[in-house]
Amino acid sequence: MQEIELKYRLSPSDYTTLLNFLENPQKEMTLLNIYLDTACETLRTLGLSIRLRIEKTQNNLHYKLSSKSSLKRHKSLFICDEHEISLSREEFSSAIDNKTDILKKLGHTHVHINKPLSPIYFCTTDRKDYTFNQIPLTLDQTYYPDGFTDHELECEFSDFTRSRLIINNLFSTLSITSESQPHTKRSRAMLHKTSSPVLPVIKEFLNE
Amino acid sequence: MNEIIQHLINYESALLDFYKSLESEKLSTLLKILIKKETCILDLINQNKEALSEKLPSPKSPGLFSFLKDQLLQPTLPKEPTEAQIKNHLYLSEKSLMFTYLYLKEISPNKDLYDTLIIQRHISLKLIYNFLNRD
């Protein structure tokens, strides 16, 4: 499936302005994003990103596995091939421990790697979903292991012209500087990684 | 230019003057944004009045002009209005304009232009709505 979205980097104050303007999100969740690769980052070299994600809402936990490839971007527009599947808790643990053929599970049967996949980067995102003027808007506040925090607005649109028009109008009314997001979350997680292991983070995230 | 558009320009100008005339310390941030928006909207309408007029019926056509008159509230308020009265009036003025543009979009071939005006109004409405519900 092709994922097409607009992504804007926001300053902390612009994020707060949008948060106050949009008010009452339709959905709120916290995401733990764990990126898998070999120690020498073979998948990144191949332009493939594999992510395990835990979505924590007020009452539920969802485990997901996804791959993104063939990323193309122009300014704030991001297009890539995405494949996402839901996992059970057991399947998630098995994937973290490299006991599953993840690439096969995601349909990447043409990709062959000799080294094991393991968690190499991670980040945590507070996500809020809204609908404004019939377009979906997502506000993300993401925390990285080195203590860095960033903010972005995403719009997974069905009508590019209309979505861009609404976002541009919103930015100009609220005096928000329009800045295209220069990096994917994975790249930012790589930029702000530390040597801290991911397993304690997962345990803490699940309040175990 | 169609007389309906002229009527809307007059109304939008009156609304801008109305915003400028309002003095409220509590609403100063909101009014500043609304004045900026209203100025942009007026520029947009003035720059595109011929395109916006395209295929609009004569205001003398039965129904349409009275519809507009009914939709567009006169931007007047009682002397020394309360904050709540001001906010409520701002909301109703913006809402009536939005419905007018939604109506005109249906009959105009220049749907993108009307859509831009509707989006602008929608943002103003949300700003006022937030202020209405804040206190």
Image: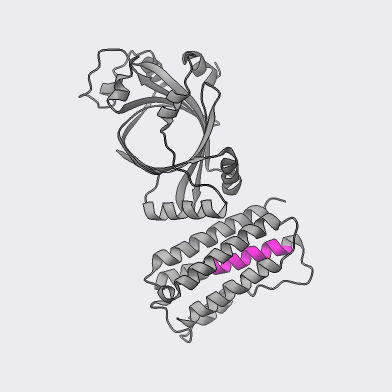
> For residue B123, what is the image quadrant?
bottom right
Q: Nearer the viewer, residue B63 or B73?
A: B73
Residue at the image point whose x is 49% and y is 64% from the top: B117
The answer to whether residue A64 is left or right of residue B98 is left
Residue B87 image position (x, y, % from top left): 69, 61
Q: In the image, B126: left or right of A89?
A: right
Which residue is outermost to the left? A110
Residues in magenta, as a range = B85-98
Q: Quadrant of the N terminus of chain A?
A: top left
Residue B99 in sight: no
Q: Is residue A111 magenta?
A: no
Residue farthest along the bottom direction in this orientation: B60
Identify the image quadrant of the C terminus of chain A.
Answer: top right
Residue A8 x/y as whole percent: 46, 42
Residue at 55 percent across and 43 percent down: it is A25
Question: Residue placed at 41% from the left, 16% from the top?
Answer: A93
Among all residues in the image, which is located at the extreme right? B80
Compared with residue A203, is residue A72 higher up or lower down, i.e. above or below?
below
Q: Nearer the viewer, residue B112 or A127?
A: B112
